[in-house]
Amino acid sequence: MAKLSRFRIQRKDFIDKGDLTLELEGLVIGSQPDCDLWLNHPTVSRLHAGIREVDGHWWLTNLSSTNGTQVNGALIETVELQPEDVIRIGVFVLRPSFTEGAIMLDVDRQVDAYAASECSTRLLGDPIQATAQGKTALLPKLTGYLQQRGMTQPLRGQTQQLADMPPAADAPEAPSPPPSATGLLHAARLQRGMTGLLTSILSLPESEQKRFQQAMSVFWERRKAAIKGEQKLDEQSPLEPRELPEELKRHNLHLGKKRFNWTPTDDLIRPWPRGYLYVFGALTTILCAIAFFAWEAAYVPGDTSNPHALPAAKLPAPIQERLSLKLVANAPVENQCSACHAATTSMQNKCVDCHETNHFNTTVIAKHEEAKIQCVDCHTEHKGADFRPGLVSRSMCIDCHRDGPTHPKAVSLKDGSPLREPHRGSFGYPVENGVWSWQRPMNPKWAKLFSESRTPLDPSAQFHLVHAAVAPAASAWKCSECHAGAFAQGASEVKVINRDKCAVCHGQAYVQTASLRELDTDALRLGIDCNSCHQQHPQSQTLAALRRPAGSSPEPVIFTKDGVYRGGKDWQWTSLAAKFGGFTIGHWALFLSLIPLTGIGFLTFDTLRKRREQAALKGQALDLANRHRKFTDTRYAERWESATQVERARVSARENPMPHPVINYETCIGCHACILACPQDVLGFDDQEHHAIVVNLEQCVEDTSCQQACPTVPQSCVLINTRQTIREAPKPLRKGAADGFEAEGVPGIYLVGDVSGVPLIRNAIKEGRLAIERMAEKLRAEGAPANADYYDVAIIGIGPGGIAAVARAAELGLRYVALEQGRRYSTIAEKYPAGKYVAFNPFNPADPPLGAIRLDGPGDLKETMLAWWDETVEKLGLVINEYEGCKEIAREGDGFLVKTTKNPAGYRARKVLLAIGNAGEPRKLGCPGETEGRVLYRLQDPSAFKGKRIIVVGAGNSAVEAAVDLAGQRQPDGTVTFPPDAEANQVTLVIRSDFPKDLTLENKMWVYYCLDAGRIQAYFGASVREITGTEVILEDVRDKREIARLPNDYVFALIGSMAPKEFLTKLGIQYAGRDGRQ
Amino acid sequence: MSATVTATPVTRQEIVNRHAILEAIRGISAIEELAELEPNHGYKFGVDLEVAIYGRNYGPGKKVGPYIRMYDYPPGVEIVRQGDWNTNTFYIVVAGAAEVFVAGIPEPVAIFEAGKPFGEMGVLAGTPRSATVIAHRQRGIRVLEVQRPALRILRKLKRFGAALDITYRNNSRASTITQLQIPDDLRKSLADIADFQLVARGHVLTSTAEPIRKLILIRDGWVKRISQTQTGERTDYLGPGYILGFNALTVREARFPYRTVAMSRTEILEIPVEALYRDPHLLERFKAALGEAGEIGTPLQPVRQRTFNPAVKAAQERLLNKGFADANNLLLMDMDLCIRCGNCSLACHRIHGRSRLKRTGIHVLRPKTPAHTKLNQSLLMPAVCLHCKDPECLTGCPTGAIARFEGGQVDILPNLCIGCSDCATQCPYNAISLIPRSELKQSPSKLPTGAARSHNGKGPGKSKETAQEAEPFDPFAAFGLRFDPKPNPVTQDEDLVAIKCNLCNDTPLNPKDATGKPAYATHKYNCEENCPTGALRRVKPHEYFNEIAQIHGPAFRQPETLIVGNRFGHADRAKLLAHAVGIGLTLALCGGTMAGIVQYGLGTPLLKSDWFNFRWITGLVGLAGIIIVMLYPVRRQMWRRRSGALKLWMLAHAYAGVIAGVVLLLHGGTSLGGPVTAALMISFDLVILTGLIGILLYQLGPPLLTTIEGEPLLAEDLAHRRDELYQEIADLTVTAQEQAEKEGRGAQFQQAFLPARDRVMRAVFSLSFLLRQYIRRESLDDLLADARKRFANAVNQQSDATDQEVMRQIIEAVATIRRIDALLYIHRALKTWLPPHVISTSVMLALLVVHIVQVVYYLWR
């Protein structure tokens, strides 16, 4: 036998005032009644903690995985208890002290209602920070609250702090617990949170304890609270939202399990709609198509040639003079295609229309006219800025004027070699009319050569040097190649000069060798072409006079749309640099500068907008404050007074930070219904004030079941500031306690107890008594009845409410008739499990005594309570008509006629008090053929059915039990003994979906035993469609398909019961939700 | 038993009789407690028993269990196969026997008789099956097949729990020792004396000056070591493969000179020093075998000096604490590269139906290399599964729907999932979310019947409904000019199913061939493939974080990794190569074109042709460039095929854009041409311009954001927080005013407080205050401190303490609002340049076609 330790427990909390000394191997603490130290509160786990003595040291072990145990504010797993330690288990505080061989535990309960219900750390921030900011007044409350909150979520950094704390230099190291104790306690941890009791583990053999260490516990540890809450995700940036966006709030996705439901982010929106690509492309295409018909000029590949697009003033002065032009015909042409390309007039005529002066003869030479060369053949339009008449003309001329009729137009020329004649003589030789005309090379490279030479050379020498030595293609030329004539005629006599010699460099069409690329460029630079000599459109017809005047620039003139470029080397670069991509540098700079300008403009605009918004802020805030005020009640507000101003300001002006229940302490009847309903242990019970309180605000998942469960009418005492729709349980409308719970709109009928939707035995008793008292006053006021055989009151239904009413009526001397369809208080006597503890809690000492029905003390066993009631019945000699069901209630004169099963004539009563509970009638199948008489709603004696074909509808405990009982004899080990086949019933279960979760394990074992043995056949997802003469037709619940036709003798419909709504509605009693809405 | 064998079924047969299962449980001593009756209380583990054998129905579609099924395997039939990842079940022999084979050994290495559980190690540790088990070749076998969640129930049983614990530790000890770099015979003797332990986070492994009784070899997890030196306290971190207390082998009575604390769930191997000393031969050999490894773990001298680089240390601590180091396959985002486009989320959304990637999560700063002394790399681990070494979600699942699969990836089987969201609650990284079952993108055969009926929002029925609602006609929406609507959040709470990252397995990205093997040699992740800048990568943490790799001890051969992951260094080689090629091409093509034009002129006919000149060359090159550029948006819409990483397409887009831009501008020469050509040129210029702006923003925006944002947040979150702060200012003002009126200071409040507040707000909501955030780039804390200092006057003017406090809070709120503004502008800028770019592109493309037609027409004419 293991050593026993002595535990002394002093209960200072309300629940149990008695002191207790226990001798146990270990003390088990939890909310389960069979724990050694029973702490009955939702914040305490069923098996919460254990204390055990090892060699004179007392060790406390946490066994609760959800709620945690704290010692001195820190969550612990296993710790040695020291004097002055404060253990916190849920709302309880345990203070251990030690005497020889015993531990004394002071048990007290602490609920800081204010801190728990109304603060949240999110609002208050870190306590340490709070102190730093001078919020000292708040700190004690806050710390208390945080400690409490630490049950589920430890303070951030706390564990880390503990781990990081270097051991104090002088303090001796804490002795590590003896190995046996650790092993033992770790073994205990293995079982934490389980239904098995600690004591059974504590008696493990020593050898096993040693091996039985912590590995598995660590493996299964729930790290979430420890790690997630503390470190991984909990760090919130001040820039992060504290609340969820409206969109998600609208969908109630902010708390509870729903917080894990998938939510979208803006990332899922494509950064640009695809329509941008299609619509704008299509739009452009459409515009282009329209332009094709309406504005042909748009399709001109380039600009029209520059002279036509230029105001004359832009032309260089020499050209203007020479051409005697004042205006280049910009305006008449207007860049319109039709100006030239007309369907009826030839293009030539179009030109001649304007250019009709002598200067602009259509052609200058008859041969050209013959060859049908038109203006546009030389003056090519649509070439844009780089149109160069020189280039054009050169290629044009050379097309014809060459050796051989290569050009189609040359065919019409008679001689076929037209150039010989005009170029005979001085062609290529720079002597004009006997005067040396060549001055210096145009090529700068060569010019530089000569200027740098030591000996100055005359132009003639330069010319010859260029042609004999410098020009690449001609460098190997000998004198004879040009001066090939009779030498006797003198050196100056050039005999026959092959024009090709000159044209090698000076004419593009004659470029033949590979190296001419450079020459061509030079030629371009020099601007030498046919036009250099042969000016077209002269005044004179004499070619000889047409030579370019000496000194006039041979450089090309480049026309651009908005200017004239003269000559220029590298003309392309210059122009490209000036207009890259068609835009000038200025344009590009403008474009680029728009970016920062737009940005800054946008920022400025936004800044201004912000300032305007300031004004609106105040108005909005006032609205909010007003809205919020509706939610506060006076007591709530009083508690707020103690908070610091700033925090109060911040919290109260806003809507509540998150959904959480708010309890109206005035109307709370302390029924625990909300506490039990809450799946998250948000609510606790304040035993001192006798009402529910919010203890874990953060845990609220907005489940609303507390509000649904709250029985107080007309308005629930617990409200959740939720956006969820709260299902309203239909309840009969009745007046308040001052009117004795008279039904709304049906004077004379009173509703008490469960039938009104308000549960609790204590409450029913209170209501029954109150109703009778008010009724008695009313009866007195109404005076004597017209008919003497009228009862004062008919009390229907003898449960807790009924018996209290009867007792009170007897005390007040009213004439009553008490009717009960079964045995008195049968619901409690039969349906409550034997030995059930019925809590009268909360007992408010301020309540007046309740007369004959005992209702004091914290509660007692059901049997004891029934014994008290029986005692009352005997003592007062109460008459109760048992087994007399009420069939009908009808108004008759001032009173009512109550017809019963035993008294069809009926009792006449001035008032009727209904305390019929809400068990109601069995639910019907609602299918055709149900009235055939084969349908039963209760199985009383299974032995009455032998060899029958039976269908049981339903999957609850009663249905399963009935089915199994009909199939065989239930055995305690989960098996069923079946009767011989001849006597066996053929049982079929018809189940809408599946067995419900509240089907007990025993029933499940039995029914599966039968199913496996084939003694019961089950149809899942099925319902009864029709009951015919001999058959029952089953259908699929979902698609309504017929699935079976079963020959059948009996149908048991065990599918629950309906509240007595129909009965009450027939009396004219209205049903409504709790806030009065129909 | 033998009777069933004679029928020689080739596959296993399920025994559905629950009572038989119950009887089988009663017959197995390890788990008989499960079916134990307590006098007057019914079954001791009633609910557990119910769930295990019968299953329990928690609502429609929410049936849990049964976890335990019974099967008959005919002789010789395989039960588990070595190397299989399907480790969601283990087995207990009921009758008959099992033969255990290990690859390479022809004879069975063991025979399991009735009552023996097997396969539970795989379930516990999440490792592949270590042996093949077949039904006994003569006797056959009847086994209980137990699913993972039953482990939670069964370990409550005293005997089974103890057995499981012992098995776990024995097996882990064996595998730890196998991993050690020591001779084989030494392994055996070490196995006799060593003990395997698993310690929880925060567990103190050694204390300063504590005598070294045991050497502690870290097998997995992380340990923080704190030692006192002359210069003060020194902390470092040790990973798997370190041995603590090694110098006890040289100095007999050595004491630990440091304190060590487990930073996570840590597996250790304890080797008692006494036992080593008892056998001097063993001691010597052990010392010799592990000498080098041991020496490093023990002394205080750092392995390398840079281990004590504070920046590296800070990074190590954060990486370890935040769980980065515990990942098998970690999704990382380099926020200096991240352009906040959200394409990763969208890619995930496209391939999985509902995005499993949210672009916020845990953020760390780290030095780029261990030599850096600054925390200059901003890394985000988004809220997406990191396939933990120790998955929390797995242990929580009541139906065993979450399991490890090939390569150790953790995935959810939708047909088992009941949508209870326990795994989501458990996951410390918020990586699991719940969606309606009908929206699962799965082949219908994999879904349970009844769930495949999908209510797709885009179905014809739905559009009819919307038509009936007769919404006002929106011409913009009709032409697709409105942004796509955001998908709706999941609001229902019935019939949900949990989803999480499955590394794009079984998606069109990683298809499988007919044999069930991956069709491609490399594994691709859609998010990574679709990151346009290469900011997002999936990495193996211990390879990517060299500061973590550094703290892997030398005792082990190599750190274990379960899962496929891309081997990433810090340099993105593909991108570097693409840049090199891009720059080369740009220079070559642009330079060549320019040289050609200089040489020949734009209009000079080339190659003896009449028309072929540099206009044409530039035009055609430009056209090719535009075609390449336009491939990018096409690629960007492709979520399903292997079309190459988007980052490379992005670079190709940018370079081709630059080339086309230069060449086509040269093509245009100095003339805008006729109206159509001019419009084309202008639209082209706009495309180029917006593109350049985009490049500029992408280069400047993210680094600017990372310096001032602190924690990377979504733009929508920032905007939301801004609204909250506005609200807060309003609330504060009003309540302070009410308070003042109540105290009779109403007039004073009006005169002193409100003007002061408005002055502050005017100053903060000014352009200069906004711009200074970009210019100074200070942290938010510094900004707030500065704001407090700057507006100290406004606070001091208030006579009442409450008003002062309110004013202080208002100042902080407005300054924060301005910081959010500053951040939001960058966020917006990173996105808003795109629509103009797209619009001008579409105009350009249309005009381009017109231009080409026009040119060809004129040529032909």
Image: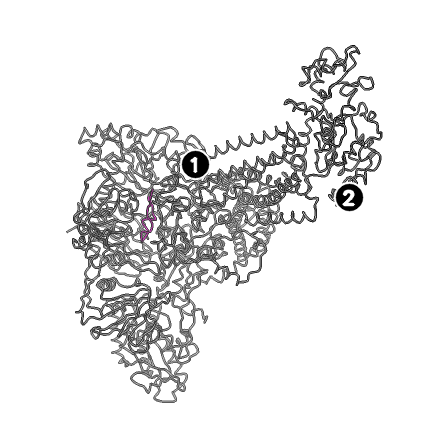
- For the residue marked with disc 2, what is the amino acid? Thr
Quarter-of-image position of residue A929: bottom left
Tell me the tag on residue B366.
1
Asked if residue B75 lies left or right of residue A169, the reply is: left
Mark 1 neighbour density, 10 Å: few (under 14) some (14–19) many (20 or more) = many
CA–CA distance in space, label 1 to label 2: 81 Å
Residue B511 image position (x, y, % from top left): 39, 45
Between residue B658 and residue A255, name the one nearer to us: B658
Q: Quick check: A998 above or below B279?
A: below
Which residue was labeled with disc 2? A345
**Label 2 chain ID:** A
In the orientation shown, which residue stands out farthest toward the front?
Answer: A414
Element type where label 1 sits in the image: strand
Residue A832 image position (x, y, % from top left): 27, 69
**Label 1 chain ID:** B
Does the magenta segment cover residue B154? no
Residue extent of the magenta highlight: B390-407
Between residue B92 and residue A878, name the one nearer to us: B92
Quarter-of-image position of residue A487: top right
Between residue A26 and residue B23, name the one nearer to us: B23
Quarter-of-image position of residue B203: top left
